[in-house]
Image (cartoon, rainbow, N blue to C red):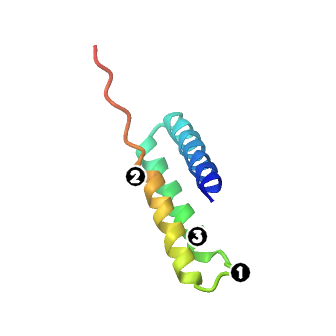
Amino acid sequence: MEELNGRMIACQILITGLIARVANDQADPLRFLTEFRDEIRAVVAGVRIAGALDTERVRLTAQQTVDELFSLMKPPSPTEE
């Protein structure tokens, strides 16, 4: 189980880095992140969850994970001259 948790954390870090990289290439990174987060939350809200006894708990955990991933991203620091 710990190996699975470690792999999930590694995937979350990878995804966070990829999203941040794409956001940095946008003219308005904060707007991009906000819109992307909203799209991901909509997907999580609408996805069919099969095989779980408590699907709402699974969905809530997924929503919290999305929120955690996006809370890790901050706007770029202003460049010092």
Circle 1 Cα neighbour tier, 10 Å, few/some/many (<14 / 14–19 / ≥20): few
Measured in 3D between alpha carbons, the distance from the residue under mark 2 to the one under mark 1, in whole angstroms, is: 28 Å
Label whose residue precedes the other's in the sequence (2 or 3): 3
The numbered disc on residue 50 is 1
The numbered disc on residue 72 is none
Type of amino acid at the residue the image marks with label 3 = Val
| Residue 52 in the image, given as x and y percentages of width and height | 65, 81
Measured in 3D between alpha carbons, the distance from the residue under mark 3 to the one under mark 1, in whole angstroms, is: 13 Å
In the picture of the structure, the residue carrying the numbered disc 3 is: 44
| Residue 21 in the image, given as x and y percentages of width and height | 55, 36
Label whose residue precedes the other's in the sequence (2 or 1): 1
Give the SS element for disc 1.
loop
Q: Nearer the viewer, mark 3 or mark 1?
A: 1
Type of amino acid at the residue the image marks with label 1 = Ala
**Residue in the image at 65% along x and 74% along y:** 47
**Residue in the image at 44% along x and 41% along y:** 28
Pointer 2 with pointer 1, Cβ within 8 A: no
In the picture of the structure, the residue carrying the numbered disc 2 is: 71
- Foreground of the two, 57 or 45: 57
Measured in 3D between alpha carbons, the distance from the residue under mark 2 to the one under mark 3, in whole angstroms, is: 17 Å
Circle 3 Cα neighbour tier, 10 Å, few/some/many (<14 / 14–19 / ≥20): some
Circle 2 Cα neighbour tier, 10 Å, few/some/many (<14 / 14–19 / ≥20): few
| Residue 66 in the image, given as x and y percentages of width and height | 50, 60
Q: Residue furthest front?
A: 2
